[in-house]
Image (spheres, rainbow, N blue to C red):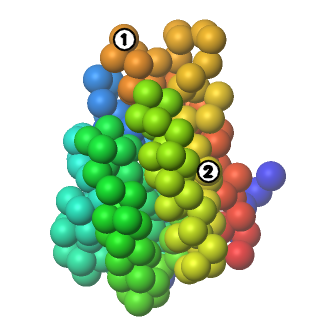
Amino acid sequence: MMVPVLPASAQGILIVGDSISAAFGLEIDQGWTALLEERLEEEGADIEVMNASVSGDTTAGGLARLPRLLEQHNPDLVVIELGGNDGLRGMPPTNMQQNLSAMVEQSQEAGAEVLLLGMRIPPNYGVRYTQAFEQVFADISEKYDVALLPFVLDGIAGEADQSLMQSDGIHPTAEGQPLILDNVWPYIETWLQR
């Protein structure tokens, strides 16, 4: 399906994420963000993908970096893929919610649409914490009317076949990266069509 080519004034897509979007343990061109850029080119969409993801980053780190990134890149779409490291460090979901909310507000004030990529954490953190963690993404999506992919690693992490995950059990392999893009792409495509 052909995607309409955006006008020359279109700035592109800014991705603010952690190691999942920074292609941890892989060559950067194997990561889903590089594959996104390739797919946009194949679809005839002249859109720059600016990947500002940092391995190990938290929502607090993303929030601290965001104002400069928005000013520097003036994106049309901000993809936020953060929260996993907050969860792995056992940080309070309320803090994560405040940080992500502020990121969404700043992006919207800068005139960008927002796509939120949700994360899940291992069950050993306890049911109450893992549910509160996941609920943060749903609450922000509803409050700010932003698109939400509930679990960016759906069909990749937590599967019986662990060949799509690196030995650390946290980061996808090169084979898992196209599947991340497949999860994200319908949301990007909807944004393009608008």
Q: Is residue 141 left or right of residue 78?
A: right
Characterize the local packing of mark 1: few (<14), some (14-19) or many (20 or more) Cα atoms within 10 angstroms: few
Residue for point 29% across, 23% down: 25
Q: Which residue is mark 2?
A: 150
Q: Nearer the viewer, residue 150 or 185?
A: 150
| Residue 183, image x, y percentages | 64, 42
Q: Secondary structure at mark 1?
A: loop
Residue for point 35% across, 61% down: 96
For the residue marked with disc 2, what is the amino acid? Pro
| Residue 12, image x, y percentages | 45, 68
Residue 157 seen by the camera: yes
Q: Nearer the viewer, residue 190 or 106?
A: 106
Characterize the local packing of mark 2: few (<14), some (14-19) or many (20 or more) Cα atoms within 10 angstroms: some
* Depicted 193 relative to depicted 33: above or below: below
Residue for point 21% across, 59% down: 61
Q: Which mark is residue 31?
A: none
Label 1 to label 2, Cα distance in Å?
Answer: 24 Å
Q: Nearer the viewer, residue 80 or 26?
A: 80
* Depicted 40 relative to depicted 67: above or below: above
Q: Secondary structure at mark 2?
A: loop
| Residue 67, image x, y percentages | 24, 77
Residue 16 seen by the camera: no
User: Disc 1 vs disc 2: Cβ atoms closer than 8 Å?
Assistant: no
For the residue marked with disc 1, what is the amino acid? Ser
* Depicted 164 relative to depicted 113: above or below: above
| Residue 165, image x, y percentages | 46, 18
Q: Is residue 134 left or right of residue 81?
A: right
* Depicted 19 relative to depicted 53: above or below: above
Q: Which mark is residue 167?
A: 1
